[in-house]
Amino acid sequence: MVTPDGVVAATTSNTPLDRYLAEQGELTAVERFTQAAEGGAVREKTGTWRDRIPLTRPVVGQQYAFHVDLDTCTGCKACVTACHNLNGLDDGESFRTVGLLTGGTAAGGEPRSTPAQPFQQTVTTACHHCLDPACLTGCPTNAYDKDVSTGIVAHIEGRCLGCGYCTWTCPYEVPRFNAARGVVRKCDMCRDRLVAGQEPACVSACPNGAITIAVVDTATLRHETDRPGQTLVPTAPPSDITRPTTTYHSDWGLPEGLRAVGGTIDDGGRSHGPLVAMLVLTQAAAGAFAVDLVAGHRAATPVIALALALVGLVVSLLHLGHPERAWRAMAGLRHSWLSREVATLGAFSGLALVSVVTGSRVVEVAAAVAGLTGVVCSAMLYVVTRRPSWRAALTGPRFAVSTLVSGAAVAMAAGAGRPVGVVLAVALAAKLTGEMAYVWRPMTESAPASGAPLGLSTRAWIRLALGVAAVVVAGAGPTGLVAAGVLVAVLAGELLERSQFFTDASWTGMPGPKR
């Protein structure tokens, strides 16, 4: 700082940049090497100085992990560029991202001592190579592997069928679907370079040494991530979901009230049409078998239900990046709810076919049990992702009542009597009431600015109109074409509601661009 007399005066500023420059000015390269040697960071035989990766490999009870010094991360994205180039990633593909935390209501000490001082922090993030990786447990094809000696979670591209389920189970939006290749890909910590004693691309490229590789004790880390409210950085998901191994450190501390810029994951408003159709049609089929057993057998009910189930399963293949690999989907039966859904719905379709061919009531009962079990697996598939809008208290009732309503509509179209129509009308009326209160509520909060009547979107109004029409007509117990029209109205309304199920799904994730 220059005084009015032209004299350079010492400044009392003590920012991270000042501190870093002071350290660099005080030590020569030789002196830094000497300190490293005295601290045991130099190999005795080769004299190699490694200050960004460990000198020894993990032993039992340890694994590799990223360590990020937030004080020296400038957000230059050299790590992103190096990762992209070294790994030969496609255009628009990235294994590492750089995001931003902003806000702050009060400081945590010098030099951020002014209340409500504006503040921002860049955050570099990649795969956290979790102790309990949700991508691995959710994958139906066992396309993920956690190395027992290094702890690195790697993706096996040849096994991936492109279902994208891991992109939902991972709370940190790490796996990314590559549409051109039809598979998911992710960071593997440049494990080939680590084996050769070299730094991962992002570590090597960082000009400030903000990213390093550390060896962490898994038992200690598991204990730390089990603490209530523990997160990697502000707004990140709770660490106890997957127990991530990455550590973020700041000598200065982060102020309270920080929020991630663009931290909400919402799948870009995608409705996942093939999955929507599969869920609605298979639940209608399972519900039809159950209603048929309770309300009295109608020969046409299993036939219509079988047709709906088969159409739903075939359409679901359109969701896969590699439909020809669909046969792998039951490989993860022991740990993946998607594998269990495929297995139970597949068994349901087979039993439904046998029931139609033989007319056996015993087989029909077995088909109904398998179908309802499949509905439970479908619900759990989304519940385990821990997304707020997919929690069990909402997803379970939505799927259960959809199964009853659409199943009753199938039975009525097959000639069931007025009691089934009354059940359909009552259940659908209750479902519409719940939807207007919970399912379409996000639209209610945002749509008034656009002038939508009562704050409901066009899709919500169409769904409501179809539902009310079905309630009014179904209560009279119609038959023939009218009953078939009710079935169409019910299924169309359920398709709209299930589409909203996906587009409303959100999660507050790590700072950085979302998929």
Image (spheres, rainbow, N blue to C red):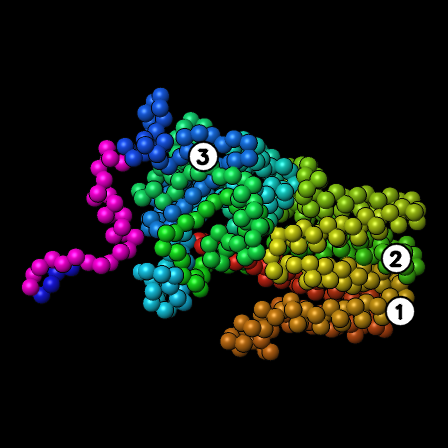
Q: Which residue is mark 3?
A: 190
What element does badge 2 sit on?
helix
Q: Residues within 10 Å of mark 3 (few under 14, many from 20)?
A: some
- Residue that label 1 marks: 418
Q: Earlier in the sequence, mark 1 or mark 2?
A: 2
Q: Quadrant of residue 470?
A: bottom right
Which residue type does callout 1 highlight? Arg
Q: What's the magenta region?
A: 5-32
Type of amino acid at the residue the image marks with label 3 = Cys
> With respect to residue 57, does 382 lie above or below?
below
Q: Earlier in the sequence, mark 3 or mark 2?
A: 3
Q: Residues within 10 Å of mark 2 (few under 14, many from 20)?
A: many
Residue 489 position in % (x across, y down): 74, 66
Please report the residue visible at 69 percent of the width from the left and 46 percent of the height from the top: 337
For residue 64, say whether it is visible. yes
Structural distance between the alpha carbons of marks 3 and 1: 65 Å
| Label 1 SS | helix
Q: Quadrant of the N terminus?
A: bottom left
Q: Residue at x 22, y 59 (%)?
A: 12
Q: Is residue 28 left or right of residue 130?
A: left
